[in-house]
Image (spheres, grey):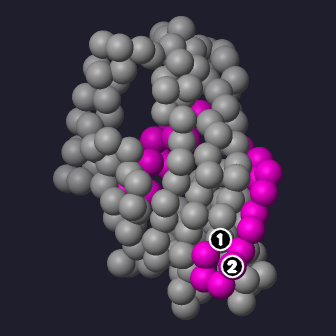
Amino acid sequence: MSEGNKALVRRFVEDFQAGGCIETGEELLAHNFRNHTPAPRERSDRDGVMQIFTLLHAILPDLRVEIHDMIADGDRVVTRKTFLGKHPASRRRSAAGRMIAIDVMDIVCVRNGQIVEHWNSVDRLAVMRQLGLSGIAWLVADQIAARIRRSWRG
């Protein structure tokens, strides 16, 4: 069971998170999926994950993911990984042209061939610094991201 769950999570990371294949995300995230550690103002459901990665691919079009460790025990899979991508030079921010690295540790719960729960740890301050955001600039960026998310909801 653990090896099968690791293969499922690896496919989720490679095809959906890194590859941007929405169909894989829809297939592998359960309809009743719950993210226990969403970022501020992020939805904790399946649609929230889909929105996060749509936004992440828009910000880092060459996004890739390096898996450093993956450990499984029963229905839980723990992954230590790094999301990497070059911030487009066409963007008018201090991060333009820089390589962005986001270190993440995830724990997911897999049941019946789908991811049903998620917990993670991300150093958000390090991400803000790499994007050239701090203090007031981060609050403004957060407000803009919230508006984008609301427009996706319709």
Taking the image as shown, residue 101 lies to the left or right of residue 51, namely right
Does residue 83 show up magenta in the picture?
no
User: Which quarter of the rendered picture does the N terminus lie within?
Assistant: bottom right
**Pointer 2: residues within 10 angstroms few (<14), some, or many (20+)?**
few
Residue picked out by circle 1: 77
Does residue 54 show up magenta in the picture?
yes
Residue picked out by circle 2: 73
Identify the residue shown where x is 54% and y is 42%.
Answer: 122
Taking the image as shown, residue 64 lies to the left or right of residue 95, namely right
The amino acid type of the residue labelled 1 equals Val
Q: Position of residue 124 (x, y in %)?
A: 49, 33
Q: Is residue 43 above or below residue 46?
A: above
Q: Is residue 57 above or below residue 98?
A: below
The residue tagged with tag 1: helix, strand or loop? Answer: strand
Q: Quadrant of residue 87?
A: top right
Identify the residue shown where x is 49% and y is 26%.
Answer: 125
Magenta-tinted stretch: 48-76
